Each structure stands twice: as structure tokens, then as C-alpha cells.
Image: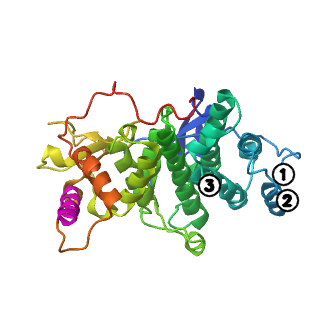
Amino acid sequence: MRNEGIYEMRENFRLTGFGFHFEMKSKPHPNSAEADSSGPFLLSTPRLLDDKNPLVETRENKIKQWTRKLPVMNLLHSSRALLDALTLLNEQPLQEKHRVQLLDIYRDPINTMLLSFNPLYLRQLPVPSTQREQVAQNITQLPLMLANGYKTVVKQGYQLGHKPSKNKTLLLAAIRACEQLSHALLHLFRIAHPVPPQLYLELNQLYRYAEHYQILHQVPPAAKRAGIDKDIATIYKQLMLLAIADPSRLSESEILSTYELLERLLTHVDISPPHSPLEEKHYFVVDLHSDHPPRALAPHGFTSENKNLRLFNTYSLLRKVGELLQQAENPSVTRVHKPDVQLLRQLAPYLNASYQRPSPDTPLPNEEFIRN
């Protein structure tokens, strides 16, 4: 199917961990000045209705009033209500700026629910284990549903050839989509649930999109005014380093602490296309067209013909971790916070690509918190 002779698209339905999605694989026409030779842009989004549903609320003030009245102490009810509202909103044909404005209203309570999520509190709720499990699943779905709305804006802009470097709404939508997918993945790590299909793929694709349009380190003024200064490069790098660190080996509280610790070390990690010569032990590799996190680089493990490969160079990071651990042993210098020292010791081996990781069959420290 052609869209004004500029894009080639394949359309299909797919049943994923996110529910039914309409998937559009868009690729700029080879003659386009914006052609990206590394392959089609893969993002899954819901199919939009042909006409607006008059029963769906799209007035900002009404949605704000509704979200303020949500019973925050009743996680099952409030999470279900938010999911239902987002499902309907994501099907609505809306102007891109209006869509982002509405999604941002839902974003506040969803972020609060996610970031204040306490597995211990959930385990102590006087409800059946099936309801606790449902709450955990709902909270996982919320950022995914929110990301769907932002991805719709990103995909539509891509199809029309709009540049996020010049369209601040598009830039904000891309950052928000990456943010919400990362929140979902972090939550899955915390509750020791499997990562659903396409989640890593879409994070990889958004990174490639930002790299292609040279917006990896850009944050729109509106986000800065709201106190949000994380760009796509920061969000992506922090989360992928956590994946490299193997969060299944950490307790729920250690996962959050490690995630926060890694944010302070991001300047010591570089992401770049493949080059030579390489020292394998310092590099992890990710295919931006794959549904996988970075993996240790095997000898002769890449080809320069694959334009989707990116290398994570952890050499400088390993040196920094070593310096911090040395400081912790030296009483004459400022001591590193004790919990950080423990985390750094756990983290250090996993940042070395040559490290032989333990068997995945070992029981996980945080896998039973909901069922117990």
C-alpha cells in the first residue's frame, strides 16, 4: 500500500503481551531525502476509529477532574478505570498536540501509581492472591497503554515526514513513549514477570528513531519547565544498563537502588556503531532491529553490513566503578555510601562482557512477593 508515494507500509494484527494491536511497519521511500537505510520503523499501535466516539471524554478540564477523584487507595479499581479510559482514548482520531495534552493528564496519576508501587504493601492487602496479581498486571499495562498513545503521535509524524527536531510535540511524544516503556520494563523487573514480546524492540526502535533525527539529547522546553530533563539517550542507556546488570539476580529494593545508581554513572558509557579493533570484554552489542537487550559481544560477533548494531562500551564505567570501590576502602578519602558499595560490588562483574554469568535456573530473590 502506498501513502502519497512516500511510504511503503505493511499492516497486520498481532496478539502480543500488550493485547491486540494494529502494527504498521513504515519505511521512507528510497528516493526520500529522509530515507533511513537501516530498515522499517517498527512500532505497534491501536487502530484508530474512522470517526470520533462522542462518548469518549476529550475535554482536558473534565479529565483532570475525573483523575483527581480516582480512589487512590483502591488500586484494583483505579488501575482498571485508567486502563479502560486509555483504551478508548487511544482509538480516538485526534490532532497530535491535543492527544499529547490529554495523555499527559493521565500520565501524572499513572506515574504516581508506578513509582509509589510497593510490593510489600500489595502483599499485605487483605484480598485474594488473584486480585493482587491482577493489580500488578494492571499497573504493568498502564504505562504500556499510555505509551501506545504517544507512539501513535510518533508514528503519524514519521509517516508524514515530520522531523521531531523541528516539531516539539513530536519530540515530547517520542520522549514520553520511551519513558513509559522504560517504566513498564522497570516494573516488570521489580515484580519478576517475563518481558512481553516487542517491549525491547520498541525501545530499540525509539532509540534508532531519535538517533536518526539527531534528537537523542534534546528535551523540549515544556518538559524542562515541568522539571523533566531526561532525554531519550539517558532513558535508554539507564534501562539497558540495568538489563545488562541482570536484575533477576537482585531483590526488588536492590533493583530500584541499582537503577538510581546507574543514572549517576551514565556519562561513563558510550553507545556507538561497530568499529575495529575491538576488545570484546569491554563491549556489549544490541541490534536496534531486534527484540533483545544488549548482549556480550562474542568474537567476530558482528558485521559492519548490519547498520542496526550498536556497541555499549563499558570500559570507562568499569574503571569508574573500580575507583569508587577503592575509595570505599580508603579511610582518608570521602567514603562511598555503604549501600552503594554493596551494589557496586554486585554490579561490577556484570558490566564486564567476558564475565561468565550464573545459570538462569537459580531461584530468583523477588519472584514470590505477590503469591505469598
Q: Mark 2 points at which residue?
A: 62
Q: Foreground: 201 or 269?
A: 269
| Residue type at the position of mark 3 | Asn
> Is there CB contact under 8 Å for labels 3 and 1?
no
Q: Would you say residue 198 sits in the magenta stretch?
A: no
Q: Is residue 120 above or below residue 176?
A: above
> Is there CB contact under 8 Å for labels 2 and 1?
yes
Which residue range is magenta in the image?
318-329
Is disc 2 surrounded by few (<14), some (14 to 19) or many (20+) residues within 10 Å? few
| Residue type at the position of mark 2 | Lys
> Is there CB contact under 8 Å for labels 2 and 3?
no
Question: Which residue lies most toward the right here?
Answer: 54
Nearest to N terminus: mark 3 or mark 1? 1
Q: How far apart are marks 2 and 1 (CA)?
A: 7 Å
Q: Residue 169, how many percent across, how many down? A: 61, 63
Q: What element carries label 1?
A: loop
Residue 148 found in image quarter: top right
Horizontal side of 364 relative to 282 (left or right) equals right
Nearest to N terminus: mark 2 or mark 1? 1
Q: In this view, does 247 lie above or below 273?
A: above
Q: Foreground: 116 or 242?
A: 116
Q: Between label 2 and label 1, give the one nearer the viewer.
A: 2
Nearest to N terminus: mark 2 or mark 3? 2
